[in-house]
Amino acid sequence: MKNLKSLSDFKKEIKGKKISRTSMMAISGGRRVIRPTTRSDNGAADSVLYTYDEDNHLLSTECWSGC
């Protein structure tokens, strides 16, 4: 995967691509991971984007799809 510097670059890179639920998207100098979650109210699956820094500290979470 290309070294993407920003969230907008990351979104452009995977736009329109099928991302499997077990996919992990890694970015040099940190990583962004898309993981499915299940909402308890209706059991629907959402994808949440987790952004980590180089030391594996969670920087942010963002709803990716299904929210």
Image (spheres, helix red, strand yellow):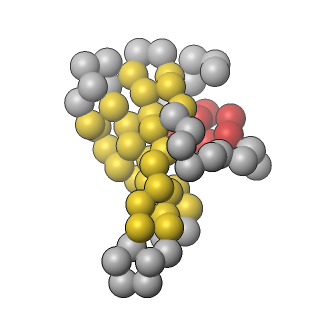
Q: Residue furthest bottom?
A: 42
Q: How many marks?
A: 0
Residue in front for this viewpoint, 7 or 51? 51
Residue in front for this viewpoint, 42 or 1? 42
In x, y percent, where is residue 50? 38, 43
Residue in front for this viewpoint, 61 or 19? 19
At horizontal 56% and vertical 49% (from top left) the residue drawn is 21
At horizontal 27% and vertical 25% (from top left) the residue drawn is 56
At horizontal 45% and vertical 38% (from top left) the residue drawn is 33
Left of 64 or right of it: where is 14?
right
At horizontal 65% and vertical 45% (from top left) the residue drawn is 19
Above or below, 15 relative to 5: below
**Residue 58 appearing in the image:** yes
In x, y percent, where is residue 54? 31, 18
Left of 14 or right of it: where is 37?
left
Above or below, 28 relative to 37: above
In x, y percent, where is residue 4? 56, 24
**Residue 15 appearing in the image:** no
Q: Residue furthest right?
A: 16
Q: Quadrant of residue 2?
A: top right
Above or below, 55 relative to 22: above
In x, y percent, where is residue 13? 68, 35
The quadrant of the rendering that contains the N terminus is: top right
